[in-house]
């Protein structure tokens, strides 16, 4: 009887105790990032920012043609955006990327004037004037790529690209091409190079250009969203902006 009374007392006390309910873990926000291959280093940095936030889950979608329709919780990274790409959307500049001209490390040419650069890419100048390297091998990115568009506007202006130019599908391929041929010359975003101008894909060096050309090849990188960023998306873009300065 005594044991029964103790058991009843335990049951009564248990019933009076507050019910312990486990709090469910918050669900990460699925964020889609669409971009052209020329901005891969920026997406990598955005991924670093997301890795510090357990509530952010990035789904990256590289593409050769950006869709004009932006969904909710989507970030579209664009270099030198056109008015059509930003119309009716919210555009946040997250930094700038410099388009640079590169040659093989064995090339003794360290600087080019605007006229010399134009002559090379239009085919008027076909051999190097310095060192033992003779034939110039011109490499370009695909037509329609924003880096190519800016480069053509600044360097070629209204002249035609040489018919001897070779096509690199993306900046990584450009690095491989220029590092693999001593007479090669090409261009790509500086974000693909290390701070000392070298890279992990091969031996290339940056060519010094005239101040006006360099300034014109410095372009904004913009994050386009459906509406003004807030919450997790805003924190990621702030992180990206601060990490690229």
Image (tube, helix red, strand yellow):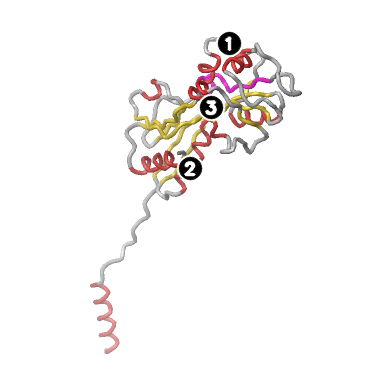
Q: Few, some or many C-alpha atoms within 10 Å of disc 1 (few <14, some 14-19, many ≥20)?
A: few
Q: CA distance from mark 3 to mark 1?
A: 20 Å
Dot 3 or dot 2, earlier in sequence: 2
> Where residue 202 sits in the image (x, y, percent)?
67, 35
Residue at image point 40% right, 48% down: 55
Name the residue that disc number 1 marks.
160
Task: Specify the quadrant of the image occupied by residue 94.
Answer: top left
Q: Is residue 51 above or below residue 105?
A: below
Instruction: Give the image location of residue 177, x and y in percent.
Output: 67, 28
- Who's the residue at 30% across and 87% down the image? 3
Dot 3: what SS? strand
Q: Secondary structure at mark 2?
A: helix
Residue 162 belongs to the span the image colors magenta = no
The residue at the point 38 percent across, 25 percent down is 86
| 3 or 2: mark nearer the eye | 3
Q: Which residue is mark 2?
A: 47
Of residues 72 and 53, the one drawn nearer to the viewer in this rendering = 53
Please determine whether, in this image, residue 197 is positioned above or below residue 158. Answer: below
Q: Residues within 10 Å of mark 3 (few under 14, many from 20)?
A: many
Residue furthest toward the right?
Answer: 132
The C terminus appears in which quarter of the rendering? top left
For the residue labelled by badge 1, is the local secondary structure a helix, a strand or a loop?
loop
Q: Position of residue 209 (x, y in %)?
A: 57, 24
**Residue 143 covered by magenta stretch:** yes
Identified at 35% across, 56% down, the residue is 24
Q: Which residues are magenta?
A: 137-149
Judge left or right: residue 180 versus residue 1. right
> Sequence-wise, which precedes: disc 3 or disc 1?
3
- Report which residue position mark 3 lands on: 99
Of 165 and 75, nearer the camera is 165
Residue 152: % across, % down: 54, 17
């Amino acid at each position: 009887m005594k044991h029964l009374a103790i058991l009843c007392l335990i049951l009564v006390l248990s019933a009076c105790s507050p019910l312990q309910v486990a709090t469910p873990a918050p669900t990460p926000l699925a964020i889609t990032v669409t971009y052209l291959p020329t901005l891969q280093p920026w997406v990598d940095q955005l991924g670093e920012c997301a890795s510090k936030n357990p509530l952010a889950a990035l789904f990256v979608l590289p593409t050769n043609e950006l869709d004009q329709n932006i969904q909710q919780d989507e970030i579209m990274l664009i270099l030198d955006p056109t008015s059509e790409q930003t119309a009716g959307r919210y555009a946040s500049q997250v930094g700038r990327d410099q388009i640079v001209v590169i040659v093989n490390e064995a090339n003794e040419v360290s600087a080019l004037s605007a006229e010399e650069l134009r002559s090379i890419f239009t085919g008027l100048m076909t051999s190097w004037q310095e060192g033992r390297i003779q034939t110039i091998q011109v490499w370009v990115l695909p037509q329609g790529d924003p880096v190519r568009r800016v480069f053509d506007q600044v360097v070629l202006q209204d002249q035609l690209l040489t018919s001897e130019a070779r096509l690199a599908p993306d900046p990584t391929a450009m690095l491989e091409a220029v590092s693999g041929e001593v007479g090669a010359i090409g261009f790509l975003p500086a974000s693909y190079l290390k701070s000392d101008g070298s890279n992990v894909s091969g031996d290339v060096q940056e060519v010094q250009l005239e101040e006006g050309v360099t300034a014109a090849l410095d372009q904004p990188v913009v994050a386009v969203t459906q509406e003004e960023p807030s919450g997790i998306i805003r924190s990621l873009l702030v992180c990206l902006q601060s990490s690229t300065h």
